Amino acid sequence: MATFTERMGPVLLLWLAVCLSGSWAVDKGNFKTCDQSAFCKRQRAMKPGESPYRALLETMELTNTRLTLQLINDNNKVRLLLELYRLQGNITRVKINELKPLKPRYEVPDVLIREPSTEPLSLLSQDENGVVLSLGAESQRVIVSARPFRLDIVEGRDVLMSLNSRGLLGFEHLRMRKDTQADPEAENKEGTDPANPAETAKEEEEKVEDGMWEETFKSHTDSKPSGPSAVSLDFSLPGVEHVYGIPEHADTLKLKTTDSGDPYRLYNLDVFQYELYNPMALYGAVPVMLAHNAQRTMGIFWLNAAETWVDISSNTAGKTVFGKMLDFVQGSSETPQTDVRWISESGIIDVFLMLGPTPRDVFSQYASLTGTQAFPPLASLGYHQCRWNYNDQEDVRSVDAGFDEHDIPYDFIWLDIEHTDGKRYFTWDPHKFASPKEMLQGLLDKKRKMVAIVDPHIKVDTNYKIHNEIRSRGFYVKNKDGGDYEGWCWPGNAGYPDFTRPDMRAWWASQFAYDQYEGSMENLYTWNDMNEPSVFNGPEVTMHKDAMHESWEHRDVHNLYGLYVHRATAEGLVERSGGVERPFVLTRAFFAGSQRYGAVWTGDNAAEWDHLKISIPMCLSLGLVGISFCGADVGGFFKSPSTELLVRWYQTGAYQPFFRAHAHLDTPRREPWLFGPENTALIREAIRQRYTFLPYWYQLFYLAYHTGEPVMRPLWVEYPQDPATFALDDEFLLGRDLLVHPVTEEGARGVTAYLPGKHEVWFDIHTFQKHNGGQNLYIPVTMSSIPVFQRGGSIIPRKLRVRRSSTCMENDPYTLYVALDNQRTAEGELYIDDGHTFNYEKKELIHRKFSFANGVLSSIDLEPNAQFTTKSWVERIIILGASKPSMVTLKTADGENQLEFDFDASMSVLTIRKPGMNAGADWTVTLQ
């Protein structure tokens, strides 16, 4: 142990002591506030209404695809270049950079899926005060005002959005460092004009301000070789009171105003046992905000990968309902408005204004820029069993057998860091996991799979092949002095591969090949943790900002690092199969575009009721910005849940996209059967419900892959004109057709769910009880209750024969749940493919549309050119809100026959038994 201590070092041991002790609370002192982040403090100190920037209209150039215009800062005479583009799909792009920077400023690569297509801009009018440009559709215009510079996007008489209307555009130009103590004549040597007192005063002010050329936080010093380089811009949103997005934060769905505290921070960090309901940074950062009111939805995508802070203020914040009513009665003319300000440490301003007008339009607009959610293998939508750590192969075998013994389905069992040989990734512990292929084959025989962790910190050890190859190829991130950057992580001293390099990513991907990753098989998938990156002895538990990625500082690329790790790993899993098999990779760190590479989870949560509650808005926020495949550790990672909390968490997780139980090394074991037969039965039922809905989940992910629409979505997405939905985040929709209100209160005897849609009806999926929309419904609950409702007007396919894994259910029959609306109509879809390859891209799929109207239920082909067959059939049709027919007939290509049925008059439920038609066939069922 002495040798271990020497190798691990006191810093790591101290960190581990905190992690493994009973003290489960974030140390806020490890993470910066805005006041402790020099650039944030400087930018936030700017006063509204005093913008030094004006547009030099004589420099304007307008081509068919873009407008360029110079801006000048009248205080320091530095010029900026404004570029404005009208993009296809009702998007406006605004870029601001220095006209002549001392050296290039970082522009984020690899996030946009292609260079966006432009549409023509045309000049409508121009005078000495500004210019007006047409944005084409629906009389949309851009007004550029000259003094001070301001940009407004208007439609008709309505201002949709304004930029720099509060005068908070800030752009710290790159400059040579002036060290007057070393050289008293330095200012004149740099060409400052002493006759210009404003410029001289500004230089003096900049010279003495702390944190511009060096910054210290705790024991860490950031050398800032490029000096100050922050950028900021304010956006005003008239008529808007609700803004969402900018994950990841452990906060409500509706973002709060930040006037009285810190801004929301976007800076990927390994935050130990994060606190709830505050704007602290967490593991991922997606710089996308949605704004919504009853008339319109819009989005702002701030494409910058450096540390970013987002301030939000509102003229209605803090007003009570009574106060708002008083304004109304007194005829107050104040229009609600939300003001947002983005502040980033470096890079340029590159912002996409997604103008909607509907929520679906915004999802489509953002997807056109950064892509859609990767279409996952069907099995990954099943249940995942994980803990830190399953001890050895016998432990894995025993847990696997336990699921069979207790008749609980699962698809993936997971191995955390202890499965490796001394935290060397791509290896196996030679004693505990001596024959990994035998273990994997045992799972494969049961049609199950495994995930093993592969983290991006690499043990510095000359006996470790991965380390030697990375070092010999020069692939490690460098420190500011040019040597390999090293820091402490799980293996002790570790190097950090430079995933920003395409050649490094290609090499990393090659390591997943079956002949490289010894012991791996086709049913082994991957988990990327600690990829913020986590550096135990680094500033804020991450990498030093002055570390170097070839010619760029880490400060420029920080929030991209996790995305690049995720991407390289996913590409490795695709390549190992020759491009045939879909990958499954879970990541903790993420950025805009991470949806293209797999799944995300909410990190190291705790076994507390509030952490169960927060999982809902956290995943809703991620879905709004393109990342649908989201989940939280069921049961909580830290601490030990009560049996009630554990059951309720399974019931909630069963209706969230990524469904995985996980637990800390120090917690007691919590496999589903360890809490007595009653709780085992409750957990079994929740997991089995998940499996019955797999056809619906799969269809929703196929839709997300095609459209960018979130799988798990807030109610306002489907009911955008209903203000009662705008701040709801204790319930959610899956697609359009399932409404879920999990029980997240300890000791709850009832919940109140809001059922939206004044002219709609909702059916309890368990009892088939019918309820009208547009009401708050009180629902008594017991420990077995999971309040879920199917929308009237929908048809949902389910598989009720639950087996030990999703793959075992591949050829099983479907039951169609037809929930009629008030017009006695309904529609839905069914999507089928092989569940694991990319062959759907070659149209090897079945995509059916179900419709019910005028007493006829039909199935038609949405992809008549597709080629795929299924052995599955329809074994049952359940129609909710039905009338009793005298006869039910089925018509297929083989002819016509009568079907058996039962009718429950008390619940208006018609059950049609054994229709027996193939799930991929054309057919009609007629009620007479």
Image (cartoon, rainbow, N blue to C red):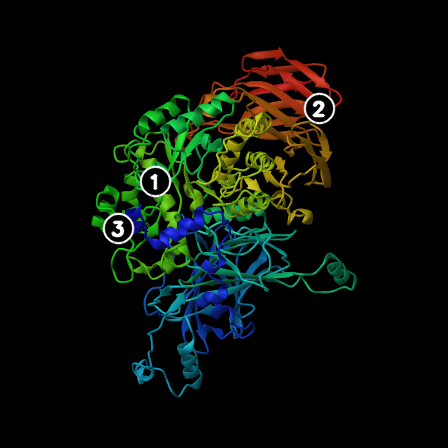
Could you tell me if residue 582 is visible in this image? Answer: no
Task: Please tell me which residue is depicted at 73% across the width and 24% down the height of the picture.
Answer: 907
Q: Earlier in the sequence, mark 2 or mark 3?
A: 3
Task: Please tell me which residue is depicted at 35% across the width and 54% down the height of the picture.
Answer: 10
Reply above or below: 518 against 40: above
Compute the Cα span from label 2 to label 1: 49 Å
**Label 1 with label 3: CB-CB less than 8 Å:** no
From the top left corner, tell me how far across and down residue 51 is, in percent.
52, 73
**Label 2 with label 1: CB-CB less than 8 Å:** no
Task: Please tell me which residue is depicted at 39% across the width and 48% down the height of the picture.
Answer: 531
For badge 3, the amino acid type reads Phe
Instruction: Give SS at disc 1.
Output: helix
Which of discs 1 and 3 lies nearer the camera? The answer is 3
Residue labelled with disc 2 = 882
**527 vs 160, nearest the viewer:** 527
From the top left corner, tell me how far across and down residue 476 is, in percent.
27, 52
Crowd band around label 1 with a 10 angstrom C-alpha radius: few (<14), some (14–19), many (20+): many
Residue labelled with disc 3 = 475
Q: Specify the label residue 571 is tagged with.
A: 1
Crowd band around label 3 with a 10 angstrom C-alpha radius: few (<14), some (14–19), many (20+): many
Crowd band around label 2 with a 10 angstrom C-alpha radius: few (<14), some (14–19), many (20+): many
For badge 2, the amino acid type reads Ala
Reply above or below: 113 against 413: below
